């Protein structure tokens, strides 16, 4: 890539940035030379009840053991709240903007602390104990953040569940995590629509979730719902009665802070386990470094709190750093296009962090929309969740950032806890479409298919050679699966599942998943998960799911099904319904093809690569067909899907 495609750091930004090029080089060198010392120093950004004397004791070998700051003790909610009270008790911690312009609430650190203590006491009063799991199933309302921090306060693990999961998807996660209590709401507002939350949760529990003892219900839209005696409780009266004094639990650094479910290439979603100490150090370190955090910032991360991005950059990172967060309940274009820009102007947002899928859909609006807003409070933009194409990057930079704001393209995953590869905005010039360079202490490598290290320029599988504090410790109830999934590709390396290219400047360009995971509007969906839920309908013999490019969503899901009796009506709709029922509406297939058979190798493996090409109507270069058990399948599939385009 030539220099003219490099975006240098705007001098006005560089002049005030917290970390410049020389500083970053020094940090990177320090982290490489003496990681133990570097990370112990970084641990100093938190308040500990017992300061750690050890940094890493991690090993990617044998059974895989990941441990950081193991002899330290702390509480995450204290780090996000109590420790700020003396200096910034009256500073705004959280601005909530509801869907309607008139719905605004501003909470100081003192007020947020009080709300968290009340919620924590409600949970304690119900018998929730340290180590218990509490499911949080809420819209983007203040109580979502409060509930997370309340769990952290009493040492319970939160399990935040997306409002778009189906009853089946919820039941699976509740049972896997062994949740004892649920905090949900009557409904979520989504533009003109209402999304039932408690009713879906009732259906989930009706499927058999024996561990759940209590369901706390927040009233958001105020509808009347049946409450199950002895199990369901209205949240508001309990909060009103609860004490606002709640001593925090003193946690070990390695005690888990939360579980968060994500999809992989095989089996059911896995509950990634994140630690208290290492995760909090990582959240604070990366938020400050990558977003150049400073006093007076108003930080808006548009992610739902049920996403890892919502955990680390709506809640834990910015609050640990004493920032002001914006929580927005609404949609980008409701009630009219330009809603997000209006929110930025109204609340003087300085730092705006969103996803390429949203950027692509906003780019479709007439440019007059975005031009109609001042957007002069913005100083930094960020992107996360999928590769951002150079044209979307440039639009974001020009139309939203007015050429004045660096764009940080941040690569990371649920498993990594926080950002691993991104430009430090005052130090690293950006190239549109590249996540640029690993953060200090992040030992990124590219490996060939055979596990050999690629030096210099090249393309391969993105792996990490050494543990970092924010890394997930294990899969809940499945350490062997953890080892297998992430550490068996090439022993000694963490395998990300992503492909990447490294250019002559050492910049990384993420090319997307190289395993059977697809990314639909930033939602990770395992193709195996889709195939499993379709297979529960016995009218189907077999099924294969693939991801195809989609203009807005990044990828869309295409499903091929083989029916026992293809003359039965509405089979394609039945397969679609099986997916939305089994996983959720967000996984709805773009297309379902009823096919006579699936392409298989002689050893019986489905050749997804071929299905992907046929689904995209790319019939040139179908590749080597000689491995197919029956090569006539190609024409029979094309007859269903249609010819080349
Ligand atoms: O494929 C990568 C993509 O999102 C995956 C992680 O998804 P999830 O665990 O849901 O976490 C999303 C939020 C961090 C990755 O394996 N991905 C994430 N960020 C980027 C990305 N792909 C390209 N560029 C990025 N900046």
Image: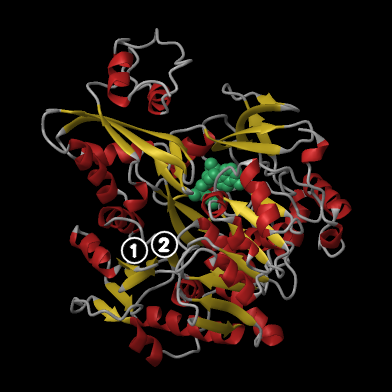
Q: Do the residues labelled 2 and 1 touch (CB within 8 Å)?
A: yes
Q: What residue lies at 15% left-to-right and 36% top-to-bottom?
A: 538
User: Label 1 neighbourhood size at 10 Å, few (<14), some (14-19), many (20+)?
Assistant: many
Query: Is 176 placed left or right of 265 in the picture?
Result: left
Of residues 203 and 4, the one nearer the viewer is 4
Q: Nearer the viewer, mark 2 or mark 1?
A: 2
- In primary-sequence order, the first of circles 2 and 1 is 2
Which residue lies at the image location 53% right of the left edge and 51% below the top edge?
364
Residue 163 left/right relative to 290: left
Could you say which disc has been placed on residue 179 in the image?
Answer: 1
Can you give x and y, in whole percent of width and height, for residue 290 in the image? 71, 57
> Which of the image's four quarters has the C terminus?
top left
Tell me the CA gap for discs 2 and 1. Answer: 8 Å
Residue indicated by mark 2? 159
The answer to which of 440 and 394 lies nearer the viewer is 394
Colour scheme: secondary structure
Local secondary structure at mark 1: loop
Residue 642 vertical position relative to residue 343 in the rendered view, above or below: above
Q: Is residue 72 above or below residue 166?
A: below
Q: In which quarter of the image is residue 461?
A: top right
Residue 184 on image: x %, y %: 34, 71
Instruction: Tell me: 623 left or right of 467.
Output: left
Residue 248 locus on image (x, y percent): 53, 79
Could you say where residue 361 lies in the image, as x and y percent from the top left?
51, 52
* Front position in the image: 372 or 201: 372
Residue at image location 40% in from the left, 46% down from the top:
478
- Decide if residue 275 is in sight here: no
Looking at the image, can residue 624 be seen? yes
């Amino acid at each position: 890539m030539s220099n003219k495609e490099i975006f240098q750091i705007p001098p006005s930004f560089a002049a005030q940035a917290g970390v410049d090029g020389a500083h970053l080089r020094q940090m990177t060198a320090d982290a490489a030379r003496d990681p133990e010392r570097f990370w112990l120093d970084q641990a100093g950004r938190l308040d500990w009840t017992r300061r750690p004397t050890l940094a890493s004791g991690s090993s990617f070998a044998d059974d895989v053991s990941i441990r950081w700051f193991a002899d330290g003790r702390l509480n995450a909610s204290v780090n996000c709240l109590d420790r700020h009270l003396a200096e910034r008790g009256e500073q705004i911690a959280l601005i909530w903007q509801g869907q309607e312009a008139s719905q605004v609430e501003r909470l100081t650190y003192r007020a947020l602390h009080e709300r968290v203590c009340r919620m924590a006491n409600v949970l304690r009063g119900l018998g929730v104990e340290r180590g218990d799991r509490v499911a949080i199933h809420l819209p983007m309302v203040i109580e979502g953040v409060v509930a997370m921090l309340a769990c952290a306060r009493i040492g319970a693990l939160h399990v935040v569940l997306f409002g778009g999961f189906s009853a089946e998807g919820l039941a699976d996660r509740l049972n896997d995590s062994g949740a004892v209590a649920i905090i949900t709401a009557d409904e979520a507002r989504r533009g003109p629509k209402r999304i039932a939350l408690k009713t879906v949760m009732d259906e989930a529990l009706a499927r058999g979730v024996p561990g759940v003892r209590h369901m706390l219900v927040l009233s958001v839209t105020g509808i009347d719902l049946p409450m199950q005696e002895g199990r369901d409780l209205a949240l508001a009266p309990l909060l009103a009665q609860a004490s606002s004094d709640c001593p925090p639990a003193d946690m070990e650094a390695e005690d888990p802070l939360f579980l968060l479910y994500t999809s992989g290439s095989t089996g059911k979603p896995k509950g990634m386990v994140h630690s208290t100490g290492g995760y909090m150090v990582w959240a604070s370190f990366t938020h400050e470094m990558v977003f150049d955090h400073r006093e007076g910032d108003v930080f808006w991360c548009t992610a739902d709190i049920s996403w890892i991005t919502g955990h680390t950059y709506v809640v834990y990172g910015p609050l640990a750093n004493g920032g002001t967060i914006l929580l927005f309940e609404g949609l980008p274009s409701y009630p009219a296009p330009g809603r997000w820009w209006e929110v930025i102007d109204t609340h003087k947002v300085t730092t705006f962090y969103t996803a390429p899928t949203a950027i692509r859909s906003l780019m479709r609006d007439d440019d007059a929309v975005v031009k109609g807003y001042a957007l002069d409070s913005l100083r930094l933009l960020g992107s996360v969740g999928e590769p951002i194409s150079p044209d979307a990057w440039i639009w974001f930079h020009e139309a939203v950032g007015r050429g004045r704001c660096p764009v940080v393209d941040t690569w990371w995953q649920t498993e990594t806890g926080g950002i691993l590869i991104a430009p430090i905005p005052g130090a690293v010039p950006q190239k549109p479409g590249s996540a640029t360079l690993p953060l200090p202490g992040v030992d990124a490598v590219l490996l060939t298919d055979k596990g050999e290290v690629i030096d210099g320029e090249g393309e391969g599988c993105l792996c990490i050679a050494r543990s970092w504090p924010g890394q997930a410790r294990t899969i809940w109830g499945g350490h062997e699966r953890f080892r297998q999934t992430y550490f068996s590709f090439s022993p000694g390396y963490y395998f990300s599942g992503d492909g990447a290219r490294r250019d002559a400047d050492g910049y990384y360009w993420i090319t997307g998943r190289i395993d059977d995971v697809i990314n639909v509007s930033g939602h990770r969906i395992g193709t195996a998960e889709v195939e499993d839920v379709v297979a529960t309908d016995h009218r189907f013999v077999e099924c294969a799911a693939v991801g195809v490019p989609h203009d807005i969503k990044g990828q869309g899901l295409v499903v091929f099904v083989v029916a026992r009796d293809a003359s039965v009506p509405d089979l394609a709709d039945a397969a679609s319904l099986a997916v939305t029922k089994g996983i959720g509406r967000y996984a709805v297939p773009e297309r379902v093809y009823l096919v006579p058979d699936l392409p298989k190798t002689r050893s019986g493996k489905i050749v997804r690569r071929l299905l992907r090409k046929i689904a995209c109507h790319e019939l040139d270069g179908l590749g080597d067909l000689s491995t197919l058990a029956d090569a006539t399948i190609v024409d029979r599939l094309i007859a269903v899907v249609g010819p080349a385009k």
